[in-house]
Image (tube, rainbow, N blue to C red):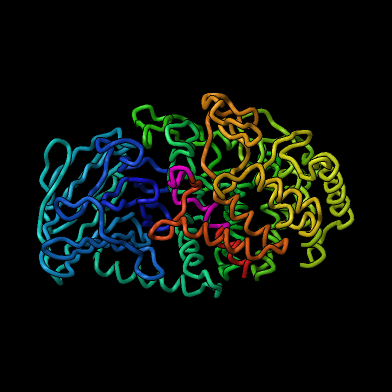
């Protein structure tokens, strides 16, 4: 399966990826960041999967979500009839459930199912026994029950069955996880849960305040962001997957099943801008718990419950998606310094308050303490927005977002009535602004640069007019946009920054060795076009009066969504494939924000 051949189902605590062939190839339980019980996505069939499809048929005829929900309906048209498989995860009460219902639409269809449960990212083959006519699998701390009227036969560490379904019939399967030391969980009614899950998502989607021309894409993106929210805490993960590559066969493979302050803050902007203030309040509570402690100990990312220790390790027994190794869990970026997060957090909280989120004195006290630490450290070099694995630099985007942090402090005090020293924060804002314009701007080329004294460009510079650092009609803004279009675009899409295999100044890019390490990010090889960057360009074009060009680019980006409206992190225009972890919150965030801006 290509990355875009998958669809997402989830219960706002974990998620599964279901392929067009009816196979669940990725599922981590009980949380987004738990070890998987199906890991074929990053290995092969021996690492676990669950396929359910008509006998002898590979890919489905069509599939779609049922209205504005996260209930997936996959349809196969065969020579003997038409059948539909309904996949969903009910909102959790105690234990996580994955429900699959086969429904006959016409004629009679023979179905086949095969399931291989493999705990701990495909490494542990469980002990499986039949109890009361149902399967019970146990391996270390993990336990799974499979309930169905279909008899599953065991052979060669797998279970399979064939059965028929006729028009009007429904055959359910329920896959339930629980800790192995707990007793058998209470069984759910799959048809009852289908009705309740559908109603829940429809009610949530109906609250969307966006009424523009791209409503379908916006609502699907909002549902995706809601699905990536860990409901017990309010934390928002960047993606439900790990190690889907930014370059096929390459090493740029990272674990995104955690909560980045940046991504979550931007998600907050998208949700509040669309009328979802309740989610903003829940995220603020998560934020206060996660960062509680000394301001100097703040991290870039946390676990879904606020965990801080996220050691990065590799899983050598997994071959990687299309041979892209290593497969990583954990994320070393947790220990990096990324100064832009202060601006993103302050901006998100400011916008959420403007949209109606109630004030919180405890939150303001903690944010003020955090900003006092920031006041004395904003001028340090950092790893920046892109989490480079090379040396720290004075990244211009980081400094721009430092300006945003000080600016939003001024606005919160002046506009929202919070107590604070306006002159102090205003002076810091002016100091940062002057330094960025002096050290981060190249007057000869009329463009801001990636870092102080560098010649490289960075697509993150497109945010300069978006965040209000400079007005859109400033010649330095239009010059930067022109430079990004000239030097960072490939086949109509925007790259984050030049990598080892991309240098538009060279007449023969083939001369570049893919094994060469990029001097900025410290990694070999290239990557696809980071989709958020192209959305930024569309928004920047709109702000600078090029509305027609902005809409043209935006609609081209929307056309990249797969058949159920989902986007990965990147897109390779050469192979016309999505790349990176999937679905990616960052891509859907900026789809929403660009739609709001164009409206």
Which quarter shows the C terminus? bottom right
Say whether residue 281 is visible: no
Residue situated in front as seen by the camera: 37 or 79: 79
Quadrant in which residue 64 is drawn: bottom left
Count of residue discs: 0
Q: 550 or 429, which is in the foreground?
A: 550
- The quadrant in which residue 524 appears is top right
375 in relation to 318, above or below: below
The answer to if 583 sits in the magenta stretch is: yes
- Does residue 346 appear in this view? yes
Give the image location of residue 412, x and y in percent.
Answer: 77, 62
Residue at image location 53% in from the left, 72% down from the top:
213
**Region in magenta:** 574-590
Residue 486: x percent and y percent? 67, 45
Image coords of residue 187 (percent x, y): 23, 60
| Residue nearest the observer in this picture, 255 or 475 | 475
Would you place residue 469 above or below residue 279 in this image? above
In the image: residue 465, left or right of residue 247: right
Q: Residue at x 32, y 40 (%)?
A: 39
- Residue at 66% across, 42% down: 487
Quadrant location, the N terminus: top left
Q: Is 433 displayed left or right of 404 in the figure?
A: right
Residue at image coords 63%, 61%: 549
Residue 599, above or below 401: below
Q: On the rendered structure, is 278 left or right of 174?
A: right
Q: Is residue 148 magenta?
A: no
Q: Is residue 181 left or right of residue 416?
A: left
């Amino acid at each position: 399966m290509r990355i875009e051949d998958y669809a997402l189902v989830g219960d706002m605590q974990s998620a599964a990826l279901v392929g067009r062939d009816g196979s669940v190839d990725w599922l981590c339980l009980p949380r987004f960041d738990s070890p998987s019980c199906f890991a074929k996505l990053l290995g092969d069939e021996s690492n676990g999967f669950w396929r359910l499809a008509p006998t002898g048929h590979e890919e489905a005829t069509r599939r779609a979500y049922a209205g504005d929900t996260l209930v997936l309906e996959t349809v196969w048209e065969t020579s003997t009839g038409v059948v539909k498989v309904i996949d969903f995860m009910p909102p959790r009460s105690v234990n996580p459930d994955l429900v699959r219902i086969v429904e006959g639409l016409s004629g009679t269809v023979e179905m086949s199912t095969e399931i291989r449960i493999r705990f701990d990212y495909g490494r542990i083959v469980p002990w499986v026994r039949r109890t009361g006519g149902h399967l019970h699998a146990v391996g270390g701390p993990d336990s799974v029950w499979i309930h169905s009227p279909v008899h599953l036969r065991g052979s060669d560490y797998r279970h399979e069955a064939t059965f028929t379904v006729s028009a009007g019939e429904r055959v359910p399967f329920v896959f339930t996880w629980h800790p192995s030391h707990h007793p058998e969980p209470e069984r759910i009614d799959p048809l009852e849960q289908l009705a309740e899950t559908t109603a829940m998502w429809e009610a949530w989607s109906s609250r969307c305040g966006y009424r523009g021309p791209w409503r379908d894409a916006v609502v699907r993106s909002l549902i995706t962001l809601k699905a990536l929210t860990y409901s017990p805490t309010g934390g928002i993960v960047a993606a439900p997957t790990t190690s889907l590559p930014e370059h096929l066969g390459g090493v740029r493979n990272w674990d995104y099943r955690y909560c980045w302050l940046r991504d979550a803050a931007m998600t907050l902007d998208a949700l509040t801008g669309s009328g979802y203030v309740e989610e903003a309040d829940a995220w603020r509570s998560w934020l206060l718990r996660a960062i509680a402690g000394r301001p100097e100990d703040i991290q870039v990312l946390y676990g879904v419950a606020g965990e801080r220790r996220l050691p990065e390790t590799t899983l050598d027994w997994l071959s990687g998606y299309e041979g892209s190794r290593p497969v990583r869990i954990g994320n070393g970026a947790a220990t990096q310094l990324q100064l832009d997060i202060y601006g993103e957090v302050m901006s998100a909280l400011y916008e959420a308050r403007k949209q109606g989120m109630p004030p919180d004195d405890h939150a303001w006290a903690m944010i003020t303490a955090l900003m006092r630490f920031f006041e004395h450290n904003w001028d340090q070099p950092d790893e920046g927005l892109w989490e480079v694995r090379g040396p720290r630099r004075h990244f211009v985007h980081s400094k721009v977002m430092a300006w945003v942090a000080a600016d939003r402090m001024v606005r919160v005090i002046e506009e929202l009535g919070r107590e604070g020293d306006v002159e102090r924060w205003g002076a810091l804002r002016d100091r940062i602004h002057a330094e960025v314009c002096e050290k981060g701007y190249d007057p000869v080329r009329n463009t801001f640069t990636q870092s102080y004294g560098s010649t490289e460009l960075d697509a993150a510079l497109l945010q300069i007019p978006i965040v209000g650092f400079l007005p859109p009609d400033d010649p330095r803004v239009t010059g930067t946009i022109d430079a990004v279009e000239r030097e960072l675009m490939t086949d109509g899409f925007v790259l984050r920054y030049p990598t080892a295999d991309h240098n538009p100044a060279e007449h023969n890019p083939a001369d570049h060795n893919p094994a060469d390490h990029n001097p900025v990010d410290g990694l070999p090889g290239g990557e696809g076009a980071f989709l958020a960057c192209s959305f930024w360009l569309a928004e920047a074009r709109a702000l600078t009066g090029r509305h027609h060009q902005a809409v043209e680019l935006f609609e081209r980006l929307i056309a990249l969504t797969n058949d159920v409206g989902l986007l990965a992190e990147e897109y390779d225009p050469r192979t016309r494939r999505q790349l990176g972890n999937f679905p990616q919150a960052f891509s859907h965030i900026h789809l929403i924000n660009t739609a709001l801006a164009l409206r």
